[in-house]
Image (tube, helix red, strand yellow):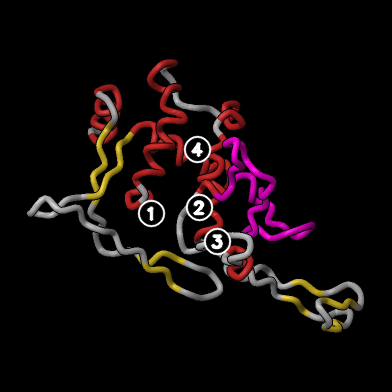
Amino acid sequence: MLSQTIQVVCRLFSTFGRYWIILGFLPRFEHRSALPYCEAVLREVFRWRTIVPFAIPHATSDDDIYEGYFITKGTKVLPNVWAMTYDESMYPNPDRFDPKRFLNTNGHLNADSQILGFGFGRRAHAGRYGADATVWATILTVLTTFNIAKAKDDTGKETEIETVFADGMVSSLQQPETIQMQLTPRNDVIKQLVTNMTDV
């Protein structure tokens, strides 16, 4: 996904690269609030391809009426998260990966902060904070330390990576046997770190 979205990668690095280049360290969790575009990318990652298209079944605790439909107490309700995250009235061009949809005109985060794939209310997934922090740290670490670009074929033409997702109760990326991309360390310090890791 990121190798196909070079503009996103470039903008991401421009927003947090100064920490590594100027200050000499990777961004930390205390810098998170100062990196709204990175946060917008995280929200778009979770929206664009939610892992669980349908949330855990719930049951109504009382009789209810929703958009003219009478729902009796005890009815099982299966929230369609995919439909919510692909609602064009909320997310225009939902198939397009666009972190800017989570920013206002001033470049600050908008109020759309709920990651629907983790569920809602009291039944929201208990591991959501750990997953959120892990993905955020991975995005920052990989993009701070590596340049990511499309690979080129024998003629010098950039190759495309086809992403195919399996449908079902849990969505999964159907990985091709090989993924062709260019992943290069941003500087000699990173290059040496990677070399040392492969020597272990």
Please identify, in this view, whether the residue under mark 4 or under mark 3 is nearer the observer: 3
Residue 1: mark: 1
Q: Are marks 2 and 3 in contact (CB under 8 Å)?
A: no
Residue identifier under label 4:
137
Q: Main secondary structure of the magenta part?
A: loop
Vertical placement of residue 179 versus 60, above or below: above
> Which quadrant is the N terminus positioned in?
bottom left
Q: Indicate which disc, 4 or 2, sits on the residue closer to the N terminus.
A: 2
Residue placed most toward the observer, 171 or 18: 18
Residue under the image location 29 percent in, 29 percent down? 186
Instruction: Of the two numbered discs 2 and 3 on the same chain, state the one appearing first in sequence.
Output: 2
| Residue 106 part of the magenta-drawn span | yes
Q: Are marks 1 and 2 in contact (CB under 8 Å)?
A: yes
Instruction: Look at the image and give the residue range highlighted in magenta.
Output: 101-130
Q: Nearer the viewer, residue 67 or 163?
A: 67
Distance from disc 4 to disc 3, alpha carbons, whole Å, reads 28 Å
Q: Which residue is mark 2?
A: 45
Sequence-first tag of 1 and 4? 1
Identify the amino acid type marked 1.
Answer: Met
Instruction: Rate crowding at label 4 as few (under 14), some (14 to 19) or many (20 or more) other CA atoms within 10 Å.
Output: some
Mark 1 and mark 4 in contact? Answer it, CB < 8 Å.
no
Q: Secondary structure at mark 2?
A: helix
Please give the label number shown on residue 92: 3
Using a 10 Å C-alpha cutoff, classify the residue at mark 1 as few (fewer than 14 neighbours), some (14 to 19) or many (20 or more).
Answer: few
Give the CA separation, mark 2 to mark 3.
16 Å
Give percent across and percent down for residue 143: 39, 37
Q: Is residue 128 magenta?
A: yes
| Residue depicted at x 69% and y 52% | 126
Q: Amino acid at mark 3?
A: Pro
In the rendered image, residue 174, in percent from the top left (x then y), is placed at 37, 67
Residue 47 vs residue 21: left or right? right
**Nearest the eye: 38 or 197:** 38
